[in-house]
Amino acid sequence: MSEQVVTQPGGESPAPDEDRRDWAGTWRQITESSGLVVAMAIFAALVIAGLLVILVDPDVQEAAGYFFSRPGDTFAAAWEAVSSVYGAIFQGAVLNFDSSTFAGTIKPFTQTLTMATPLIFAGLGLGIGFRAGMFNIGAQGQLLIGATVGAYIGFAWHLPFPLHLALAVLGTAVGGALWGFIPGILKAKTGAHEVIVTIMLNYVALNLVAYLLTLEAFLPPGQTNPKSPIVDESAQYPLLLGSQFNLHWGFILALLCAWGVWWLMERSTLGFEFRAAGANARAARTAGMNVTKTTILVMVVAGALAGLAGSAPVLGTEKALTDQTAGSLGFDAITVALLGRSRPLGTVFAAILFGGLQAAGPTLQTVAGLRPDIVYVIQALVVLFIAAPPLVRTMFRLPVPAHEKEVAA
């Protein structure tokens, strides 16, 4: 018996095989995408961190002592330990439903955005370097120098708003750009490796700032503590949502910079030269591009963005320069850039993720009774899995992209 084909009103017969092939192709594109690998890496990091929480929780350990007689107690204690930790992270980073006011409810998320602001700036700068084939890990030093210049303009110059703020912000960018110019010119002219140079410059910047904070020009009258005067109010970022929140207009500037970096790298000739030099410097030179100039410009632009990251603490939150201003922001930004695949949109979301983890630290200690070090454990696990995509694909049985198979072959 021959198979009867039913035609549709328009005269065209359906093609179920083609539909199945289209769906299979779409599903394969999803499973091969780098975005899914990133999501699975974060998920794996959260799962393993949860297992570590279970292992160190005293209630779980006590219940495990009589596991074979009452196994339900162990599982209940494990669930309570994990849910309390991740509930505290949500409460400290996203929404606090225990608050009786709307402002208190949304304050954690605004704090997350505040913490993410310098990471967006620095992550964008590092992402440009990565896409240009340079592993710039000098954001820490560039941020410190930018913060130093911006803070000095903020407390030493007395100008009206918004001119004062604009000059202070510009000063942070110029300071970071100058500090980025040094490894750029050394690599372009002498072939010095940017990793070594930027590492050394991080230490130089740290000790330079510590020295400057012993000078009278950087200290309030009659004080010896290593902390500069408070920057003038005319040089401070205005608050974005009012005095109840720490979120300031630096976050909006960071988003504008993200759009600017996208336009630079995807729509401009200079961005094409950056990417071409990173893909194959010899081919770019053969095509007539000035790779020496490109190398210097990449480091200058990256340094300027890292310097802008220094504006967030000295002009936004702390409003003064200290030897702890940078914290670990420059090094955290490396993870943010890698997690965001060196793309502006990915960098913004990665910065918000890490900003949320940092904002949740105090809540972990007060609500869950856990040391906030678990935040650093989660960050380290995310870095581990992001740095090893084949491991993530193997764990979740994701297919290897076709282009990776071709490279391996």
Image (spheres, rainbow, N blue to C red):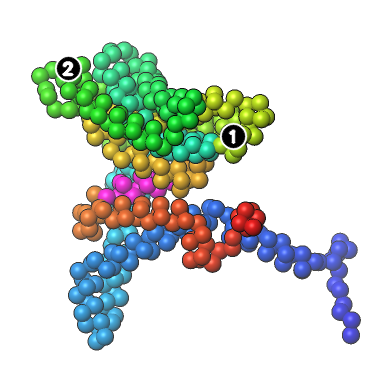
As for residue 105 lying within the magenta part, the answer is no
Dividing the picture into quadrants, the one containing residue 42 is bottom left
Q: Nearer the viewer, mark 2 or mark 1?
A: 1
Q: Which residue is mark 1?
A: 281
Q: Earlier in the sequence, mark 2 or mark 1?
A: 2
Q: Which residue is mark 2?
A: 216
Question: In the current view of this chain or complex, which residue is farthest to the front?
Answer: 190
Q: Is residue 404 visible?
A: yes
Observer-nearest of 362 and 304 = 304
Question: In the current view of this chain or complex, which residue is farthest to the bottom?
Answer: 69
As for residue 351 lying within the magenta part, the answer is yes
Residue 31 image point, x, y percent: 58, 60
Residue 18 image point, x, y percent: 77, 64
Q: Residues within 10 Å of mark 1 (few under 14, many from 20)?
A: many
In space, the residues marked 2 and 1 are separated at their CA atoms by 47 Å
For the residue marked with disc 2, what is the amino acid? Glu
Residue 150 image point, x, y percent: 32, 22
